[in-house]
């Protein structure tokens, strides 16, 4: 989910799905490019001709993480909690052929729409319909190299996916060097993002955050990418790649990240909240 300014569309496909109204909007600059919106919120962009083209800033940062989890082209056992149009899964399938990947998406109607209109035949991507946390409980311990959390109900991450108990469950399915990566949406004082860092630091010894300076300074709403592992993270290489993006990002780790999180409370089940609502019109079509 990311801020999008949609130009005149090549084509628009609309469909009522289980949890709202979905739109597939044709990218005027790419013959096989499509943006998926759900109730007006931009969820994903894919290019069927070139799955390595990543339109959204935060997805490119997640791709940097995926690129560095294992040696180039090595298959990556990946669990994607949150489906959208399976953008990152398609990217990993293209850059790491033979990667066993599972996408968990709650909305069966959305899965049907994406499967029929944006097929992923031959990629080896398995799609499961279900709740992300419930599906996580069925995954074997130590079986996942990369776990990506990118779940939004409308424009907010559900509360049951923001607690330290959820992060512990995520860590349990990772291999010894496995990586947890989460898309965190926030703005202003970044109070919610700080709680998510606190939750990750309560579980993992290594944590980092990638975000643009304007977001870190409270001047915009947007997406932070939180990365955590039991093994050392490739902070230097992540920093180099993030700095080289069209919209350069910073990487916070070590003392910088501890200063960022400051005295944030670790969120626990029963007292968590969804991620904050974005400003009107921020994601998707202007209102």
Image (cartoon, rainbow, N blue to C red):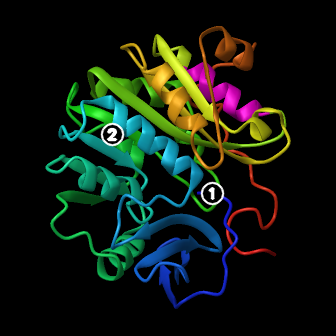
Residue toward you, 68 or 282: 68
Residue under pointer 1:
2
Horizontal relation, residue 37 to residue 284: left or right: left
**Which corner quadrant of the image does residue 278 belong to?**
bottom right
Tell me if residue 264 can be seen: no
Is the residue 219 above or below the residue 14 in the image?
A: above
Q: Secondary structure at mark 1?
A: loop
Residue 46 in sight here:
yes
Estimate the x, y position of residue 173 in percent, counting from the top left: 28, 29
Image quadrant where one finds the C terminus: bottom right
Most frequent secondary structure within the magenta stretch: helix
Front residue (pair 187, 167): 187
Q: Circle 2 is placed at which residue position?
A: 136
Residue 243 sits above or below residue 255 on the image:
below
Which quadrant would the N terminus be assigned to in this image? bottom right
Query: Which residue is rendered at x = 51% and y = 42% of the image?
Result: 61
Q: Looking at the image, do the residues carrying marks 1 and 2 touch, with CB atoms under 8 Å apart?
A: no
Front residue of 165/5: it is 5
Query: What is the x, y in percent for residue 47?
Result: 40, 70
Residue at (71% x, 34% y) in the render: 192
Magenta range is 190-200
Image location of residue 200, percent across then percent down:
53, 22
């Amino acid at each position: 989910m990311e801020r999008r300014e949609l130009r005149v569309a090549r084509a628009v496909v609309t469909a009522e799905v289980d949890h709202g109204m979905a739109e597939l909007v044709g990218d005027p600059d790419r013959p096989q490019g499509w943006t998926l919106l759900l109730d007006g919120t931009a969820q994903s962009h894919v290019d069927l001709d070139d799955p390595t083209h990543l339109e959204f800033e935060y997805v490119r940062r997640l791709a940097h993480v995926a690129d560095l989890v294992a040696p180039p082209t090595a298959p990556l056992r990946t669990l994607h909690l949150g489906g959208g149009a399976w953008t990152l899964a398609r990217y990993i399938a293209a850059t790491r052929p033979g990667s066993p990947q599972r996408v968990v998406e709650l909305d069966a109607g959305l899965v049907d729409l994406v499967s029929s209109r944006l097929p992923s035949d031959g990629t080896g991507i398995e799609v499961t319909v279900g709740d992300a946390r419930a599906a996580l409980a069925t995954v074997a311990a130590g079986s996942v190299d990369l776990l990506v959390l990118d779940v939004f109900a409308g424009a907010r991450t559900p509360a049951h996916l923001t607690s330290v108990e959820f992060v512990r469950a995520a860590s349990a399915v990772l291999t010894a060097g496995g990586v947890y990566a989460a898309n965190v949406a926030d703005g202003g004082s970044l109070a919610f993002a700080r709680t998510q860092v606190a939750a990750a630091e309560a579980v993992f010894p290594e944590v980092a955050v990638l975000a643009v300076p304007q977001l870190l300074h409270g001047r915009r709403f947007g997406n932070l990418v939180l990365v955590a592992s039991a093994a050392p993270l490739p902070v230097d290489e992540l920093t180099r790649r993030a700095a080289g993006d069209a919209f350069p990002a910073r990487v916070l780790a070590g003392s910088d990240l501890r200063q960022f999180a400051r005295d944030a409370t670790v969120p626990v089940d029963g007292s968590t909240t969804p991620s904050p609502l974005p400003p009107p019109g921020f994601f998707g079509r202007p209102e």
